Amino acid sequence: MNGPLPGSVDDLPTPVLVLDLDVLDANLSRMQARTDALGVRLRPHIKTHKCVEVGERQRALGAAGITVSTLEEARVFARHGFDDITWAFPLILSRIDEALELAERIALGLTVDSERAIDALERAAKPIGVWLKVDCGYGRAGVDPGSERAIGLARRLADSSTLTFKGLLTHSGHAYHADSVERIADVAEQERAVMVAFADRLRRDGIDPGDLSVGSTPALSQVRSLEGIDEARPGNYALYDYTQVTLGSCTLADCAVTVLASVISNAPGGQRSITDAGALALSKDLGPPDDPPHFGRVWTALEPGELHPETRVVSVSQEHGVLDTSLPVGAKIRVLANHSCLTVAHFDAFIVVRGSEVLDSWKIWRSR
């Protein structure tokens, strides 16, 4: 936003992304304490917040490096003094030169799950650390840990004269599809057990598996043990969102980010109203299977506390959001998005608040 910040949330122009500093700090401290108790390093995924100030708070609490989704995220955080970064995304072959250039300045770890990616890195003939991505049951990317191909790729990394085999990396994304906290705990244990078993298999074949890295906020919220694991990479925990509430990863009080929006239209006698928070504020993620489906829930007041039992954002176009209740033009609302990662990626900055007091503005580095 242009110009000086107002002193109160009530006076902010909309739509704007509001970050509650006290809630953020509590979330960061809680996850650091949890991973410490579980005996693993915390390497938070910064794709959720994309914010240097948040990353610095994570590092100050004890985070051991960070995880990114894009090279631009890595470059931005490297410029701000972060020098231990894992790009936890299958290597994009057309961006190898960029990755190798960055690796000359910081400890950058790449991620692969194919012969072609390893071939390309070995042709480049420059030293860099590489993780082997493992499919722990999610089915999106990664090698099948029960396959001979997985053993072969690990051996190639371990035997390479230029590449350093950093270890095995996985992501329990299927925890997001679980229907109970018990099932999430089962997924978390599956993730741990798959990684430990594959590492043992590599050792039997004379291959040092390196470190074992796991991740996902739901899994970390319910996991019973991380015995045999070295690090965890949750990201959403910094902010949380409505989906995490329904999964049982957090409570409503733990949701640190909301979209402040205004009602801009209301047809007389109608049962709906229109806000200025559409798809480019909330995304088009329908989130959990609520009835009716929606793109975000609405707090009962400008200071979060309880969700309105009836008001939801039931439809979005580019800049318009349709509410399923009638509110007066000019009314301001706080919307709890289904997916904070996607919502954050639509804004240039967080407006940082404590209660209704506006404290600061923190840049969101969302450039690809």
Image (tube, rainbow, N blue to C red):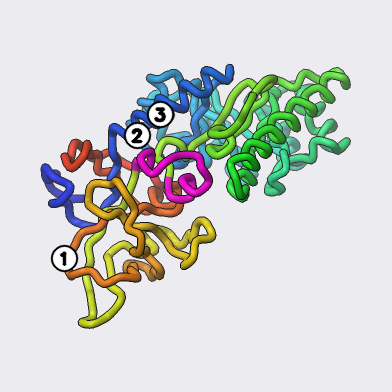
> Which residue is pictured at 21% across the width and 50% down the height?
1
| Residue, disc 3 | 28
Q: Is residue 275 magenta?
A: no
Of residues 232 and 147, the one drawn nearer to the viewer in this rendering: 232
Mark 3 surroundings: few (<14), some (14-19) or many (≥20) residues within 10 A: many
Per the model, the C-alpha gap separating discs 2 and 1 is 29 Å
The residues colored magenta run: 241-256
Mark 1 surroundings: few (<14), some (14-19) or many (≥20) residues within 10 A: few
> Which residue is pictured at 84% across the width and 25% down the height?
201
Q: Is residue 120 visible?
A: no
Q: Say what secondary structure mark 1 lies in.
A: loop
| Mark before the other along the chain sequence, 3 or 1 | 3
| 358 sits to left or right of 325 | left
Q: Mark 2 near mark 3, Cβ–Cβ under 8 Å?
A: yes
Q: Say what secondary structure mark 3 lies in.
A: helix
| 228 sits to left or right of 207 | left
Q: Position of residue 272 (x, y in %)?
A: 30, 75
Q: Position of residue 306 (x, y in %)?
A: 32, 49
Q: How many marks?
A: 3
Q: Give the residue at the far front of this rendering.
A: 309
Mark 2 surroundings: few (<14), some (14-19) or many (≥20) residues within 10 A: many
The disc placed on residue 330 is 1
| 75 sits to left or right of 330 | right
| Residue, disc 2 | 24
Q: Is residue 154 visible?
A: yes
Per the model, the C-alpha gap separating discs 2 and 3 is 6 Å
The amino acid pointed to by label 1 is: Gly
| Mark before the other along the chain sequence, 2 or 1 | 2
Per the model, the C-alpha gap separating discs 3 and 1 is 35 Å
